[in-house]
Amino acid sequence: MNYEAVIGLEVHVQVKTNSKVFTRVAAGYGQPPNTLTDPVVLALPGTLPVMNKAALDAIIKAGLMLGCEIAPVCKWDRKNYFYPDSPKNYQISQYDQPICVGGSVEIELPGAARNVMGEHRRVPLARIHLEEDVGKLNHFATESLVDYNRAGTPLMEIVSDPAMHSAEEAYAYLTSLRATMIYGGISDCDMEKGQLRCDANISIRPVGETKLGTKVELKNLNSISFVRDGIAHEIKRQVAVLERGGALVQETRDYDGQAGTSQSLRSKEMAHDYRYFPDPDLMPVKVDDAWKSRIKGECPELPFAKQRRFFETYQLPYTLTSVLVWDRELADYFESAVKIVGTGKAQAVGNWIVNDLLRELGQAHVGVTETKVSPAHLAELVELIDAGAILSSGAKEIFIEMFATSDAPSAIADRKGLRAAATDSGELEQWCRDAIAANAKAVAEFKAGKDSAINALKGPVMKASKGKADPKLVDATLRRLLAS
């Protein structure tokens, strides 16, 4: 029997704010254990929560970027459970009135053509709600210790519909969602720091069936690649269980990304186990049109929209747009340089960024905002090459020096003697005539229709010029003389 997988993702994204969601104590990462706490975080008697408006701004922004309906009124609920990572023994969350409803995440389907934008679709969302994060348990050989630094950090839970059908689709979804959050300045989404965490709900059913199968939740997917690998593993496991006549049970499983295996953790709790009820210490929040309008004005162009614009405006190939648009700072750097040189040289700018700048950034382990190569200097390099003032071979050396020193390309070319020679036209023509006279076979092949034979004539000319003749001018002069 053929089976179809049905996948939904629950993604938790830490909101980047200065303070925590219900108290003014600082939010952050990497501080000594239990130093980012106060009486509210520790749930000491008599403390009361106070809403952080910056966290609400962020979730409204996320909702608008993803096309959600922003609820005119949302409220706060207590999700009750007893576990050491929650000092209050409940979590302030949103149950039946989330702030964002609906919306979708645009993904590019696997197997898209590499020269043009491939087939896209939107994965629908059920909701996005805001809650407080919990502490972190650190397990040692004989004991477990809790660090409450993370407790109280504003946390968005983004819940998709069960609308994906492969591990690759889930990977594309998570990649697109992460980029959207980073573009909006909502979160840095560093999975190693716990700023983005994902649980996957997976079921299978016979192809053609509309009823959902038994759902299994997969946890501890601590990288985007592990999300993909874990889902693929779970689909195979479920198919194998059914094919040998077994029955699937609703459960939560732990996935070990290093070993590529999973094990059962517990039977799945239902929502009523948490005994949700409205938080009596927090008032409902009304979101009016003015508030939404202000946030909407801060929403950036999203990656796929930017990619479509780069295709249409700059005529860039997929190989460039698929790299440039996923890093907002890199895309901004590209457009800053293109504004100087004009759209006609956009592809040359893109090639230098993707092939050379990213290579040097990777080797130096720095980001584009830290590079010493300014957009203006990159634009100058492209213009010098286009004008024939420097040769392509020398340009590579100049770029490396630019990256190391932040000097202008023209200054480096002068200092290192890398400017193309201002060859006298008569002298260049004589070198070309000499090459033609000395290479009768190449001349005959060229005149017989073998265009590449002209390359055998260019070598002697470049040698005669000591490598400083403009290759474009050499090519044009040789073709003119061969045609006469």
Image (cartoon, rainbow, N blue to C red):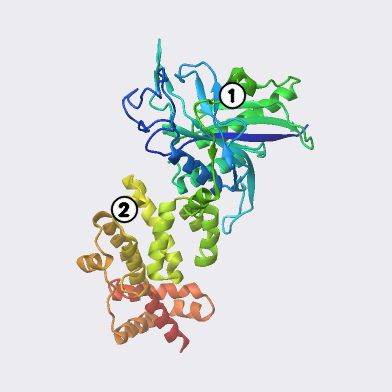
Q: Which residue is mark 2?
A: 371
Q: Earlier in the sequence, mark 1 or mark 2?
A: 1
Across and down, in percent, residue 312 comes to: 55, 65
Give the quarter of the image for residue 124: top right
Q: Secondary structure at mark 1?
A: strand
Direction from residue 410 to residue 361 in the image, left or right: right
Q: Nearer the viewer, residue 385 or 225?
A: 225
Q: Position of residue 150 (x, y in %)?
A: 41, 28
Front-most of residues 156 and 394: 156
Q: Whole-percent x and y of residue 288?
A: 54, 47
Specify the amino acid type for callout 2. Thr
Can residue 297 be seen here? The reply is: yes
- x and y percent of residue 269 in the render? 62, 20
The reply to whether residue 189 is in sight is: no
Task: Tell me what residue is drawn at x 46 percent, y 89 percent.
Answer: 484
Judge the density around disc 2: few (<14), some (14-19), many (≥20) Cα neighbours within 10 Å.
some
Q: Is 308 drawn above or below residue 218 in the view shown? A: below
Q: Quadrant of residue 40?
A: top left
Q: Residue at x 34, y 61 (%)?
A: 375
Q: Residue furthest left?
A: 415
Question: What residue is disc 1 on?
Answer: 277
Position of 361 with respect to 411 (left or right) is right
The mark lying in front, picked from 1 and 2, is 1
Looking at numbered disc 1 in the image, what kind of residue is underneath it?
A: Phe
What whole-number distance in Å separates the C-alpha atoms at marks 1 and 2?
Answer: 52 Å
Q: Residue furthest top?
A: 142
78 to the left or right of 353: right
SS for dot 2: loop
Q: Quadrant of the N terminus?
A: top right
Residue 385 in the image: above or below residue 64: below
Q: Is residue 354 above or below residue 242?
A: below
